[in-house]
Amino acid sequence: MRKMNRVLVLLAVILLYHPVSAWTQSEPGVNGWIDKQIDDLLDKQLVGQNGQGSDKQRESPAADSRSTSLVDQSSATDFFSVAANVIPVTPGLSQFVSSTGSSGNTSGAAGSTTATASLYALLAGLNKVNPTDPKFYAEHVFSRRFSFTVGTAASTLATDNTDTPATVYGAKVLLINARELYTKANLARIKQAQEANANAAKASAALKLQVKKLIFAALNPASVDANGEPSHLDSFAAFIRDHLAGDANFQATLSSLSTETKKRIQTLIDNSLAAFSQERAVFQEKYDEISKAHQLSISYTADIRDAKGNNYHRVEMIFDYGLSPRINWTVNASGDYTDRKTSSDSKGGRFATSFQGNLTQPDSAWGKNPITLTFSGEGKWQTGQKPQYTFESKLTIPLVPGVELPLAYRYANRIAQINQTDSEARMGLAVDISRLAHAFK
Amino acid sequence: MAVTRTPTVENPGVVRVATSKGQYLHFIVDAGGPIPIFTFASSAKGVLYEASDFPGHPKTKYEWDHLKNPSDIQQLDELELRLAFLTNAKYTCTVDLNDDAGNTTVVLQIDYAGTPMDKAPESFTVVIQ
């Protein structure tokens, strides 16, 4: 039965993970062709990289021992997300992937599920406003600093003194958010991007008309005046409609042009390139400056159990910094307190760090997130316990927009309380409700 | 870097406007948010509008008329609406050909979705009749 479940899960992963083919195209006809020539030339000059924030935590808090996230990130989703660690530490799966064996003590527990919402999302819901509404977004900057988590976490007798699931409570406050669009510095960056966009629009409109006139003059020399301007406007309009506006017709027109005319078009494009090059450079620079900016937050998480079970409390400082457009670095420093009902309490500290890298480009702003690879390390020091060191590597695979499958492999030198090393595989499911809903619009 | 461009009414490439009969163009840009960046430019007059020129920016709908004011009228003008996705992921652009009698024809209507580095230029030539 267990084998069959494993096969079904793997099958579901394979079936769900197929690339969504977007209908991607530029303007049709000559305009789209000019845009492509410009992009191709710029691609030769610059190798631009793009990324999408790997700083947003969509999984359960790290304080949940069944979370697929070893390290917490400074910002939660802007809106609302749900995380389920659907495959806890099953002995079969751990043995399947681990050569070091696994502990059965944490196995057999059910998974955990948490839901996180920002104060902003709650306000948008209460006001029945789309959370991306520009006016609402601009007026509620402060509310994006706060997020709340509730959920359940599995318990085991060995580590939690009960097998009744814990209730998870959490709150996070973003103290410093240099990635917020509405800071003075970022609004100034957006203004610079707007200016670059305006310069490119001006250059593009002029260039496209010049190219159209040049092609018309080359193929209709009797219909232009001494300056090469169309002398019959209706003929020019009909020429654009019939020979330049559509992709198929334009390809035929392009093929009929002489080498000399093609060279002249290329010269026109080359001479206009500066505005487009500047636009691309400014956008890349501003995007990097915003997306790599630092964030600092403070959070509190508690796993509260029944009368016999242990309660866990964690107060944590979280720092995020973009090392590059594709790599985010996170540091956690926390104070942990374990409230035991049948033995002495533990107090201690924890330090953790992780590097999250985007392996792919994002699909679109509201599409699938990139595939991310994360390497994390954590050290925990608590009274009455030997130090515990944990390492994790995690691959997060977006299934569809708003749904991600984190697959983690974790190794710990010992599990607190039972002095036993543990190596295990974990699988979860993270759902960003807003993003998912947007995909179905 | 790829824009998903979905036309409901495809860009015709050239639009004839009989300004002498009261015809003019009406532009509508619907933006998903949070901060739209776009420019409306003319080959004859350069930049006509930026998103930030509109009262209430940032907002979900931007509208303006072109060729209603005689100073806008330029023969063989190339008009470009250039959308950027740095801080706004989705746009819908609609261009209507209106006249003073209240008649409206949709010239183009296109949905766009993109990633932060994307831009989507959309342009056509105006022939004044």
Image (cartoon, coloured by chain):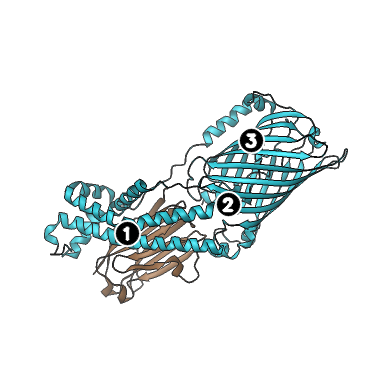
Chain colours: A cyan, B brown
- Assign a secondary structure to mark 2: helix
Q: Which residue is mark 2?
A: A434
| First-in-chain label (2 vs 3) | 3
Position in image of residue B116 (x %, y %): 47, 53
Q: Classify mark 3: residues with Cα within 10 Å, few (<14), some (14-19) or many (20+).
A: many
For the residue pair A139 and B104, the one nearer the viewer reads as A139
Could you say where residue A53 lies in the image, as x and y percent from the top left? 55, 49
**Residue at the limit of the structure toward the left, as seen here:** A222
Q: Which label lies toward us, 2 or 3?
A: 3
Read off the residue under disc 3: A392
Three-letter code, disc 2: Ser
Q: Residues within 10 Å of mark 1 (few under 14, many from 20)?
A: many
Q: Position of residue B24 (x, y in %)?
A: 32, 70
Q: Amino acid at mark 3?
A: Glu
Q: Which kind of residue does numbered mark 1 sit on?
A: Ser
Q: Does residue A303 appear anywhere in the picture?
A: no
